[in-house]
Image (cartoon, rainbow, N blue to C red):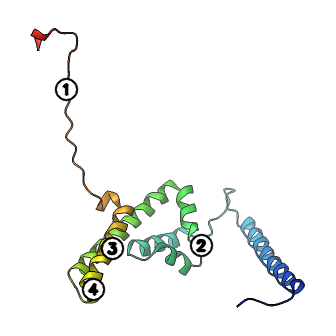
Amino acid sequence: MTDKSPPSEHSAKIKAALTVRTEHRLNMATKRAQEISEAGTFLPMIPDEQWDDILDRIASGEITSHVMKDCGFSPATINAKARRDPAFRERYKDALEDHYVALAEDIRMVTRGVEGYSTGDPRRDELVAKYDLALARQFANRVLGERIAVDQRTVTINMNKGEQDW
């Protein structure tokens, strides 16, 4: 259902909403500028302890976007943090791998028909297991991906010798 207000009323509502949003952004920027540490850098908006909790929840199998929204942050916040901080990026990757290993364990439970994991329909369980395994392999390839064995040998051929030397 759309608002059937005349155009002038609709424009006023949009302007009012934009004004509120602009004021909020200005207040947040002012607050952020006042929170400069002694070293002259901005204090993080999310403390390290909260990041630890977020990564623990992701590693335990919760979906990243749900965890971030539950904490009151945009899901893009974790990706921005990972781009800025290489150490955090590694911890985040490890948490995701743990997440998908947990997902793979859940897949095993589905395929074995364990109550609480299985839907009761074998064809649906098979579809769920295949889809989840494909996702898990895509995101945690180092842990769950196909192993490729490579046999590497060095062969030297001397092209300057005659046929009798072969």
50 sits left or right of 166 in the view: right
Q: Label 4: which residue?
A: 118
Q: N-terminal of the two: label 3 or label 2?
A: 2
How far apart are the two marked residues, 1 and 4, measured between alpha carbons?
53 Å
On residue 74, the disc is 2
- Total numbered circles: 4
On residue 155, the disc is 1
60 sits left or right of 165 in the view: right
Q: Please tell me whether mark 3 or mark 1 is closer to you in this view.
A: 1
Q: What residue is shown at x 51% (from left), y 74% (from top)? A: 65
* The quarter of the displayed image where residue 140 is located: bottom left
Q: Amino acid at mark 4?
A: Ser
Q: Please tell me whether mark 4 or mark 2 is closer to you in this view.
A: 4
Query: Crowding at label 4, few (<14), some or many (≥20) Cα neighbours within 10 Å?
Result: many
Residues 61 and 84: in front is: 61
Q: N-terminal of the two: label 3 or label 1?
A: 3
On residue 103, the disc is 3
Residue 18: % across, % down? 80, 76
Q: N-terminal of the two: label 1 or label 4?
A: 4
Element type where label 3 sits in the image? helix
